[in-house]
Amino acid sequence: MTVIIITYRIVVDYFKSFIVDIKMSLNLDHCIEKLQKCEILSETTVKEITDRMKEILINEANVQSIRAPVTVVGDVHGQFYDVLEIFKIGGKCPDTNYLFLGDYVDRGYHSVETITLLSCLKLRYPSRVTLLRGNHESRQITQVYGFYGECMRKYGNANVWKYFTEMFDYLPVAAIIEDNIYCVHGGLSPSAPSIDQIRVLDRFQEVPHEGPLADLMWSDPDPDRDGFVESQRGAGYTFGQDTVAKFLQINKMHHILRAHQMCMDGYQVLFKRTLSTIWSAPNYSYRCGNMASILEINESSEHYFNTYSAAPESLHNKPQQDTTKELPDYFL
Amino acid sequence: MAFKLLSGFLVENLPPKSEDMITVRNTDSLPKVFEILSKNNILSAPVLNERNNPIGLVDFVDIVCCVIQIINHTDLLGNDYYSFLEREDLFSHTYASYVTDLSEGNPFVPVIKGASLLEAITVMSKNKLHRVPIICNDTSPSETGPKIINLVTQSAILTFLAKHLDELGSWTDKSLAELGFAEKPVVTINSHKRALEAFQLMTEKRVTGIAVVDEKQQILANISARDLKELLNETRIFENLYLSVGEFISKVRQQDYKAVNPSICCTKDESLRKLMTRMAAAKIHRVYMVNNDRKLVGVVSLHDILEKLLDHINSGGGSN
């Protein structure tokens, strides 16, 4: 009996080594194809993807340099079918270069599919896709705003959540397009008036509660108040026109591009066209009824806000929401 | 300075305007009370009798108390569907008169119109109130008895103080540690426990909010009676209490489409001034104190701050 068990084990281990080898050569095209049908990948594949993402992201700077033409995308928040719309409107990857400003997960029903697809596209076309970190790319926020719950429901455990939140620590926090458009998820920080200060921060950590990293991901512009004022959100600041003018002058930039705030029209331009907010989640939380947009910047650095509304599938595809698991099964 | 500011400000001039004051009738059912508070985005309201005289205050903590009482009364051991119905029934047939200050944390201790803000703060601090009613006796010939004209809320006081920080004095620039805000044990609940247990714990420990923590004892969010407000659109309040604390918080917080930091914290080195500005900006009454490892070491509530403010004034510091 023992002999049989030992032989069985040897055979299983022999085959296991094959399986490990096969998985090591990750087939990204196959992954992308599967994801585009809104099918999630296995836990092991996700681990492989996030490990590889960390390997390439660790070599990216806090502030990534990007050349035009590029299409900039704001918050998508797990609205997977609307993300597919973006590729239909803005062009397929890698034909179009993309810069995403963060907030890939939470609130929408398909945060897992969304972040997995974007990670695969980044791995497949690393120089065509740039992913920045938003305030939702955080362990704390995802435990409250939906991503953690979705991972538990779709995988039965928190491993995938853990892999992605570890990967989030590696995402760069800002980008500069053609040396004159500064891109960040939230906004400015009173502790980092110079981009050079941002370049030397240690970004490889959970989003802190305060300090320049937190501010970059949480701050909002305020057309009615100058200076930096504590934010109603409980993190970051609101910043006025005077701070924007000063920032652009010190850093020799012409424009600030950011996301983080919902815009009913999909975008908003402020401060005499020196700051733009892009919002790419139409009908946000499946109830706000807003438009969304992506910003297309061409070779001559001209800006075009391409607006769109919710994808038809987004309206029909509300999955069965898991209500209390404690409910009795008298229904069955 | 602080003394002059607070003693010179009349309590009835504190926003919000009294014409907008929301009240509840003693004959209103509990679902109606719940609706009035939630729809108007307020935490509490005075309860009036047939002659429009105030008989007390009702707030979400009282509603929580009532909900816990109903659950204990219907003696739920398993998930008996009929008990859910029974409870909903009891809930619908309870009236404001019963729920008024059910938690005994909400006594009706008023100040008279014309009193100073300093007096209201003193009354609030001494009696550990969350709101102070302002009453007046000048009535029309048809109505008699005291009439309530407004409520002095913690939010209103906090907003006022934050706006006038410069006039409060430079002592607010000192750190929390220097000012004597001590570390103290915090009431916590693990995010995997039931939401019901969180509310039971609040009632038991007589606190209005507790910290939700993960396995590593790091803070995830604050859960308080005001989170019940978001369940207004739910047809069955009781079912949601059987969600885990984590799921409950998730559900409640996602009602607001603007993301906010779910766990606003401070360290003992932060200045009181900065803390008050942050609390007023985020409209919260309680901030958890953490150490460098993000572990909870204490909590600072508006009551604690008012106590320190009064200490400062009474020790003569308020006049410079």
Image: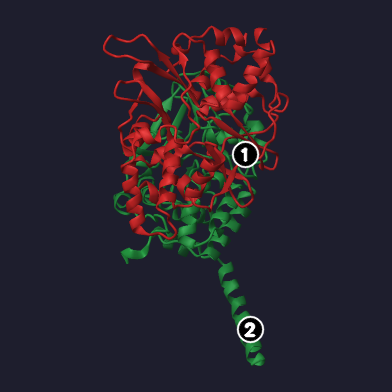
Chain colours: A green, B red
> Neighbour class for label 1 at 10 Å: few (<14), some, many (≥20)?
few
Q: Nearer the viewer, residue A284 or A23?
A: A284
User: Visible in this render: residue A63?
Assistant: yes
Q: Nearer the viewer, residue B149 or B146?
A: B146
Where residue A7 appears, as percent x and y from the top left, is 64, 88
Amino acid type, label 1: Pro
Q: Nearer the viewer, residue B25 or A56?
A: B25
> Neighbour class for label 2 at 10 Å: few (<14), some, many (≥20)?
few
Give the chain letter at badge 1.
Answer: A
- Numbered label attached to residue A208: 1
Residue lying at the far front of the rendered structure: B144
Q: Which residue is mark 2?
A: A9
Q: Residue at x 61, y 27 (%)?
A: B304
Give SS at disc 2: helix
Where residue A3 appears, as percent x and y from the top left, is 66, 92
Residue lying at the far right of the rendered structure: B178
Give the chain letter at badge 2.
Answer: A
Mark 1 and mark 2, same subunit? yes
User: Visible in this render: residue A254?
Assistant: no
Q: Earlier in the sequence, mark 1 or mark 2?
A: 2
Amino acid type, label 2: Arg
> Relative to B211, is A188 above or below?
above
Instruction: Report how far apart the C-alphas of labels 1 and 2 lie in the structure.
Output: 47 Å
Where residue A240 appears, as percent x and y from the top left, is 51, 21
Q: Locate residue B101: give its quadrant.
A: top left
**Left or right: B305, with A183 as reference point:** right
Q: Locate residue B35: give its quadrant.
A: top left
